[in-house]
Image (spheres, rainbow, N blue to C red):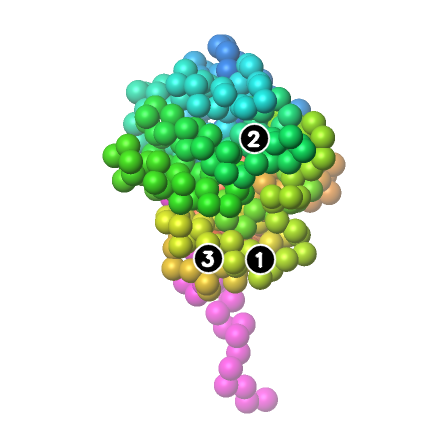
Amino acid sequence: MELLHRPRRLRTSEAVREMARETRLSKKALVYPVFIREGSGIREEIPSLPGQYHYSPDTICEEMERLVKAGINKILLFGIPAHKDEMGSSAWDDNGAVQQAIREIKKNFPQIYCITDVCMCEYTSHGHCGVLDACTTVNNDKTLELLCKVSLSHVRAGADMVAPSDIMDGRVLAIRHALDSEGFTHIPIMAYSAKYASAFYGPFRDAAGSAPSFGDRRSYQMDIHNRKEALKEIDSDVEEGADIVMVKPAMSYLDIIWQASQRTNLPLAAYSVSGEYAMIESAAKADLIDRDRIIGEVAVSIFRAGADILITYHAKDIARLIDEGKIG
């Protein structure tokens, strides 16, 4: 049989497979989420996220040293306060957990790029992402004022980038104006643009103590059925001045990642969330899967779909797999 085209020719050896590879992975594109708890001497494993830990500001540099050795220099910080109230006022406390951690990291590891999550849910006593009005719904415009205060507090502490995850209308524009008015025109905003009301967030809410005390977040996070709405949200954030847009979660939303990558010329981040991590870890613990191969395959799929940046609890594992030549 005379066949002109034999695709298997480019699969005959590892060397040719590497040369013909379409999707390339780099440790430079990985962002590692870190939980900072107010207090001291804290390094406690998170039950819902085995292998992930709560750190206090005075212990966080232990983890930074491990990240640097792994070749990872970008983190996303989440704060867990000792005190919560209706307004979430600990979020903009200049001596809050995140603010202290940023200063400690920058003093000891200036090469670490600190991105901070900007939201209220970890700080409010009710667990919602903003200020409640009399009928117990989140007041969008009053919440914007607080998000600006949080962003400014983080940046004054030394944050390199802010990442609003609240999903309030107009938040990117409000934060951009607040930063610019204080002279922080150089600080980028990574917007959680297409953030779905997903069941994959369960382990995070346990880790951050941020589960709503009543109701849910479907009045501000996106309906899982919607595709065009995600593109509309991305367009809106781009118009408001976002520097990076994001899709969250990742694994069940590869179609959205692909369409977003075709929609905008901005860098596109994808957040592989806590539930995605927990599923892999649970299946691996039960010896149902090859852990390393699954971690690698999931990461490759997200980049192949069009993501430029991957936020993942498996960042250190992915970095190791790249070093070992198993992916990348």
Measure how far apart labels 3 and 1 are at the Cα level: 10 Å
* Rendered view: 221 above or below 214: below
Q: Is residue 221 visible?
A: yes
Answer whether residue 285 is magenta in the image.
no
**Residue 122 in the image: x percent, y percent?**
57, 26
137 over 232 or under it: above or below: above
Q: Is residue 256 shown above or below 150?
A: below
Q: Residue at x 36, y 19 (%)?
A: 104
Residue at 67% across, 56% down: 225
Residue to which mark 2 is pinned: 131
Q: Which residues are magenta?
A: 1-28
Answer few, some or many: residues within 10 Å of disc 2's Cα (few below 14, many 20 plus, some between 14 and 19): many
Say which element carries label 3: helix
Which disc is residue 235 wearing? 3
Where residue 93 appears, as percent x and y from the top left, is: 43, 19
Magenta-colored stretch includes residue 24: yes
> Is the N terminus in the top left, top right, bottom left or bottom right quadrant?
bottom right
Q: Amino acid at mark 1?
A: Glu
Please name the residue that numbered disc 1 is placed on: 229
